[in-house]
């Protein structure tokens, strides 16, 4: 097999590219379901890793006759040797020239969530001294797990408001995100200086993503070009977990969808209870009080009958 694929997403936001099939193998992990793994000499498809899901899209091969074959890319993984494998349902012959097209909506969404996570983690550290220990990018929302600073026992609503406000101010500022490669020695020096929070356990050159004036981070994922492209950041929920505190959040169009969902839910509840959204809390409290009083009255009546 030839050298591993050139990762186009490291240096360019372009989602359409030309490439050549360098290797193909049958995936044996799916039982009777026939799935092929295709390697290319260059790719813009991001493989799963670092908490970020893989890209999807299509590979298109054109025969000399002009006939075209469109193959959906359903999953992308990197193996231990650093090769990127594109999972498809139709085999492509080694040496075939193809055009790859990454699904834009999914990629942009992942970039918004991933860059938003970098920003939130940096702001939690700056404002509260809380360090991010893990990150998960889900289908509807994402989470970071935080280790609170010594002496801090919980996250309050005031803390969340403080962090969310500070993060969205930085979004509005549109600060650039840039990346560059450094050797391991330089990365370790940055860690000692406090420029980096942690280093991955790997050898060789490291890709450093810089959010201007906010942080440096060793990261191989895809990102927006400036903080303004993250869009609004909203913190949805916090909860205590074994290793600290889990913060659920969403960015960009996910934040827009979640706000719309919440509005529609509150409107339906208001219509059911015949009150406006602003009066829902007092209305529910009144219903609970009436329920409690009714239960007490029924219990009293039951005692009299006995």
Image (cartoon, rainbow, N blue to C red):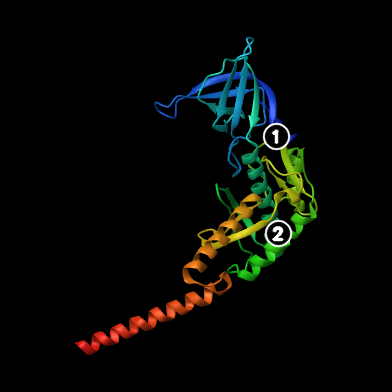
Position of residue 52 relative to residue 204, above or below, is below
Along the line of sight, the residue nearer the viewer: 30 or 145: 30
Which residue sits at x=71%, y=31%? 8
Along the line of sight, the residue nearer the viewer: 272 or 26: 272
As drawn, is 219 to the left or to the right of 154?
Answer: right
Position of residue 156 relative to residue 84, above or below, is below
Write down the residue under mark 1.
Answer: 9
Q: Is residue 245 visible?
A: no
As drawn, is 48 to the left or to the right of 288?
Answer: right
Q: Residues within 10 Å of mark 1 (few under 14, many from 20)?
A: some
Position of residue 56 relative to residue 303, above or below, is above
Q: Position of residue 266 (x, y in %)?
A: 54, 65
Which residue sits at x=27%, y=86%? 301
Secondary element at tag 1 = helix
Q: Position of residue 228 (x, y in %)?
A: 75, 51
Along the line of sight, the residue nearer the viewer: 278 or 250: 278
Secondary element at tag 2 = helix
As drawn, is 112 to the left or to the right of 303?
Answer: right
Place residue 32 in its image quadrant: top left
Which residue sits at x=67%, y=31%? 44
**Alpha-carbon span between mark 1 and mark 2:** 26 Å
Which of the image's four quarters has the N terminus?
A: top right
Which residue sits at x=44%, y=29%? 29
| Image depth: mark 1 or mark 2 in front | 1
Q: Tag 2 or tag 1, which sits nearer the N-term?
A: 1
Which of the image's four quarters has the C terminus?
A: bottom left
Write down the residue under mark 2.
Answer: 123
């Amino acid at each position: 097999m030839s050298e591993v694929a050139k990762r186009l997403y490291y240096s360019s936001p372009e989602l359409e590219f030309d490439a050549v099939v360098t290797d193909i193998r049958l995936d044996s992990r799916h039982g009777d379901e026939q799935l092929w793994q295709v390697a290319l000499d260059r790719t813009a498809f991001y493989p799963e890793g670092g908490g970020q899901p893989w890209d999807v899209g299509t590979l298109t091969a054109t025969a000399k006759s002009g006939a075209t074959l469109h193959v959906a890319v359903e999953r992308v993984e990197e193996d231990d040797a650093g090769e990127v494998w594109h999972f498809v349902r139709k085999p492509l012959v080694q040496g075939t020239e193809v055009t790859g097209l990454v699904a834009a909506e999914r990629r942009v969404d992942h970039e918004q969530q991933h860059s938003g996570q970098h920003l939130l983690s940096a702001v939690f550290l700056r404002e509260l001294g809380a360090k991010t220990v893990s990150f998960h990018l889900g289908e509807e929302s994402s989470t970071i797990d935080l280790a609170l600073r010594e002496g801090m026992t919980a996250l309050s609503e005031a803390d969340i408001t403080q962090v969310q406000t500070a993060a969205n101010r930085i979004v509005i500022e549109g600060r650039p995100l840039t990346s560059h490669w450094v050797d391991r020695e330089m990365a370790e020096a940055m860690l000692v200086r406090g420029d980096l929070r942690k280093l991955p356990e790997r050898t060789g050159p490291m890709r450093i993503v810089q959010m201007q004036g906010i942080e440096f981070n060793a990261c191989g994922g895809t990102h927006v070009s400036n903080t303004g492209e993250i869009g609004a950041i909203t913190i949805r929920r916090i909860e205590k977990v074994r290793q600290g505190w889990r913060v659920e959040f969403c960015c960009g169009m996910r934040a827009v969808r979640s706000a719309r969902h919440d509005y529609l839910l509150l409107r339906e509840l208001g219509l059911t209870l015949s009150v406006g959204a602003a009066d829902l809390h007092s209305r529910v409290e009144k219903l609970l009080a009436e329920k409690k009083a009714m239960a007490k009255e029924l219990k009293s009546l039951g005692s009299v009958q006995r």
